[in-house]
Image (spheres, rainbow, N blue to C red):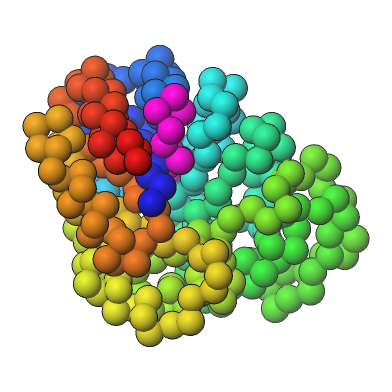
Amino acid sequence: MKVGISSPIVALAGNRPEWEHRAGVAELVRVAKAADRLGYDFMTCPDHVAVPPGLPRGERFYDPLATFSFLAAHTERLRFLPYVLVLPFYHPLELAKRYGTLDHLSGGRLILGLGVGNLREEFDLLGKPFDDRGPRADDALRALRAALSSRVVSYEGEYFSFKEMVIDPHAVQPRVPLWIGGHSMRALRRAVTLGDGWAPAPQAFRGPSPERMRQMLDSVQIPEGFDVVFTPNRRIDAIGRPEQVTELMRTAAEAGATRINLTVRHESLEHYLEQLEAFAEIAFSG
């Protein structure tokens, strides 16, 4: 079971610890370097362009491409997961070039988290169609797969088409993992048929319970090598309650997960880094 971190600082709602409200570049670099050193698999960053004031999910959202491009220079093995890019906001070639360049510069450390999106106000603001976002995203996934890891690319689909276009540089991974967000059966079927993994939201954000995740996964044919991401519904206290670490690993495995998107209880940057260290000592010792 590999474990990544749900990054602090990069997304900020009102219920985040006070230190995150004041944190910036130096603190984010320390988090990334610690995760890299301790053996965590990935770190995340969400994707929103502009949101209405007072949005419950928060108002601060770092740009994932700029953030990960910067952090790639400060790390060696940590992978980077935009969680999730809203597919209908972008042309597939735009994603293939920009994130393919990130994969190129980072030495193949990109995982693309991709979703359909649900914030109509943001779609309207950006002039993107909302009602057909599902089929548009499906076509975008097919076009993106055709474009990500090759220099000369072609695709013909319902919404997108291009013929013998050059993308240079492009992703160095022969197959960049595409993890699909969303908590519905439709999202899971999209992930199974068009992606390489499923990354539903935690239960607190209308995601499935561990039991429901297991039921959903059992109802579809899972491809070989398919990843499933489990985000715990609570912040783990690896220092004060180390038993929560093994409980989380067991719950994630029973739910059918192959990856954990970790959130930890913390009150300061130093406390956060200590929690990462304590969790790694327990979870990665085997």
From this view, report whether residue 27 is shown above or below residue 250.
Answer: above
Q: Position of residue 181 (x, y in %)?
A: 43, 62
Q: Nearer the viewer, residue 286 or 269?
A: 286
Instruction: Give, as a single range, the part of the protein colored magenta.
Output: 36-48
**Residue at the (54%, 20%) spot, across then down:** 74
* Residue furthest right as drawn: 164
In the image, residue 38 lies in the stretch drawn in magenta:
yes
Q: Nearer the viewer, residue 235 or 131?
A: 235
Q: Position of residue 174 (x, y in %)?
A: 73, 53
From this view, report whether residue 2 is shown above or below residue 78.
Answer: below
The image quadrant of residue 23 is top left
155 vs 225, left or right, is right
Is any part of residue 145 visible from this angle? Answer: yes
**Residue at the (46%, 28%) spot, across then down:** 36
Q: Position of residue 155 (x, y in %)?
A: 79, 69
The image quadrant of residue 269 is top left
From this view, report whether residue 217 is shown above or below residue 110.
Answer: below
In the image, residue 261 lies in the stretch drawn in magenta:
no
* Residue furthest front as drawn: 286
Is any part of residue 21 visible from this angle? Answer: no
* Residue furthest bottom as drawn: 219
**Residue at the (19%, 58%) spot, across then down:** 204
270 vs 186, left or right, is left
* Residue furthest left as drawn: 240
* Figure quadrant of the C terminus: top left
Q: Position of residue 138 (x, y in %)?
A: 58, 73
**Residue at the (54%, 64%) spot, across then down:** 225
Q: Nearer the viewer, residue 116 or 218?
A: 218
Q: Nearer the viewer, residue 68 or 176?
A: 176
